[in-house]
Structures are given as C-alpha cells and as structure tokens.
C-alpha cells in the first residue's frame, strides 16, 4: 500500500461499524473511506474485489455490490466480482494473482458478506487491513485488501451454510446498495481532491 507524504497522518479508529438504519450511514461510510484514501498517492490505482456467489442469498452481497458499481462504468476504479463474473473460493487466488501482475502497488478494497451477533445484523463495517474471506465457514482463503467493507447479513455461530442460504434478500440488497453508493461517492470526492491538488502543484 502506498502511503501519503504527510508527516503526521490523522488517526481514526481502525473500524467503523454502523447500522443500515442509521440516517447518517452514507456520509459516515464515505467519510471513513476518504480517510483511508488520504493515505494513498492520488495516482494509486484503486482495485475493488467483491467476493461471494449468487448461489447463496447471504453470500450474494459482494457480487451485488460489484454489479451496482459496474453500472457506473467509471474509470475511477478497477472491479472484480459481479453477479455475471463472481469472485469466490474457486477463483479467488487466481484473481489476486492477476491483480498483482496487472497493477503496480494498487490500493485494494475487499468487499464481502459476514455473519455476526444478532445485535449486529444489518450493520456495515469499514475496517483497516485485509479481509479474511471464508473464515465464517471455516475455509482457508488468501486475505484480500488494504481495507475492507463487510455487511453483516445474519447470525453466526451455528450452521453457517444453512444460515447464509436462508438470509433475507431484502437486507442483502439494502446493504449492497449502501456500500456501492457510499464507495462510489467517496471515489468521486477523492478524485476531485486529487485533481485539485495536482492543479495547485502546477
């Protein structure tokens, strides 16, 4: 991960966790993402890896976010993982190898569904550091991302595969919409900031 040239970067908690029902959720997630982007160079390629499969309702969060982001047809980021072309346990390692070969020191954002306590269901998390996909269902997969976003789609701790299969699609859709809109908003604002900084330096 590239670091900015600032001598003393701002310190914020490493994890934001917020309910999808919070009226300030879009601005809170956007603000936190901008904080993370501020630690990169403006010319750093942004790669988004949305993990999951449409074969399981609960695990479709990542591909739904990817599909929503793909509709923007934006040059601001490089996207892996949609409903049509999902990134999952079978092809994750191959995808990460491709990303390493194609981009020079990118800033990578991992996105996935997760299970949690009953009081946390419906929350979205923005976390510093890599995502550990498959951990909730005891799969050993490579870590993903300089930062990651997760949506807590259901209760964990027992029969995880069954729980993911029986997750409400309405909640998954709501969480995916919030993540996609907030992430795209943060990317647009960061791009404007980078252009403005470049203009000042000329």
Image: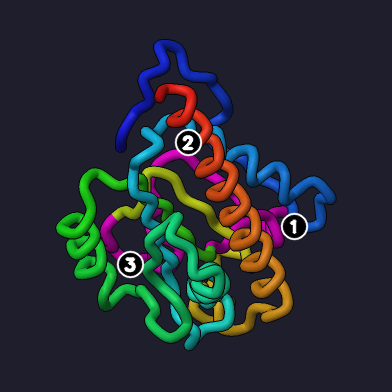
* Residue placed furthest toward the front: 202
Tell me: 75 left or right of 16: left
Element on which disc 3 rests? loop
Badge 2 element: helix
Residue at the image position 53 percent from the left and 49 percent from the top: 187
Q: Judge by depth and name the residue closer to the eye, 139 or 192.
A: 192
**Horizontally, is 26 left or right of 35 in the view?**
right
The residue at 37%/61% (across/down) is: 78
Q: Residues within 10 Å of mark 2 (few under 14, many from 20)?
A: some
Q: Position of residue 1 (x, y in %)?
A: 30, 37
Give the crowd class for mark 3: few <14, some 14-19, many >=20 residues within 10 Å.
few
Mark 1 Cα within 10 Å, few/some/many (few <14, many 20+)? many
Residue 24 in the image: state x and y as whole percent. 80, 46
**Secondary structure found at label 1:** loop
Question: Magenta segment: does it hold 28?
Answer: no
Q: Quadrant of residue 5?
A: top left
Q: CA distance from mark 1 to mark 2?
A: 29 Å
* Residue 173 drawn above or below residue 105: below
Q: Which residues are magenta?
A: 114-142
Residue that sits furthest to the top in the current view: 7
Earlier-in-chain disc, 1 versus 3:
1
Question: Which mark's residue is nearer the viewer, 1 or 3?
Answer: 1
Q: Label 3: which residue?
A: 139
In the image, taking residue 174 as reference, residue 94 lies left or right, namely left
Residue 202 coordinates in the image, percent (x, y): 40, 25
Disc on the earlier residue, 3 or 2: 3
Residue nearer the viewer, 23 or 103: 103
| Residue 79 sits in quarter | bottom left
Write down the residue under mark 2.
Answer: 194
Q: How far separated are the C-alphas under marks 3 and 2?
A: 39 Å
Q: Is residue 131 left or right of residue 112?
A: left
């Amino acid at each position: 991960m590239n670091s900015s040239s600032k001598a003393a970067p701002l310190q914020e908690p490493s994890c934001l966790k917020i309910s999808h029902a919070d009226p300030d959720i879009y601005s809170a997630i956007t603000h936190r993402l901008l904080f993370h982007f501020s630690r990169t160079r403006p010319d750093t390629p942004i790669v988004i890896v949305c993990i999951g499969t449409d074969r399981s309702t609960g695990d479709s969060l990542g591909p739904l976010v990817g599909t929503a982001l793909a509709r923007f047809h934006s040059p601001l980021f490089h996207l892996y993982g949609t409903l049509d072309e999902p990134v999952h346990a079978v092809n994750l390692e191959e995808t990460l190898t491709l990303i390493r070969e194609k981009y020079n020191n990118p800033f990578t954002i991992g996105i996935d569904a997760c299970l949690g306590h009953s009081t946390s269901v419906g929350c979205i998390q923005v976390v510093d550091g890599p995502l550990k996909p498959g951990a909730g269902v005891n799969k050993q997969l490579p870590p993903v991302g300089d930062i990651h976003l997760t949506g807590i789609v259901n209760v964990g701790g027992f029969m995880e595969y069954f729980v993911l299969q029986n997750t409400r699609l309405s909640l998954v859709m709501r969480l995916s919409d919030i993540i996609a809109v907030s992430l795209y908003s943060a990317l647009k604002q960061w791009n404007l900031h980078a252009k403005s900084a470049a203009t000042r330096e000329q």
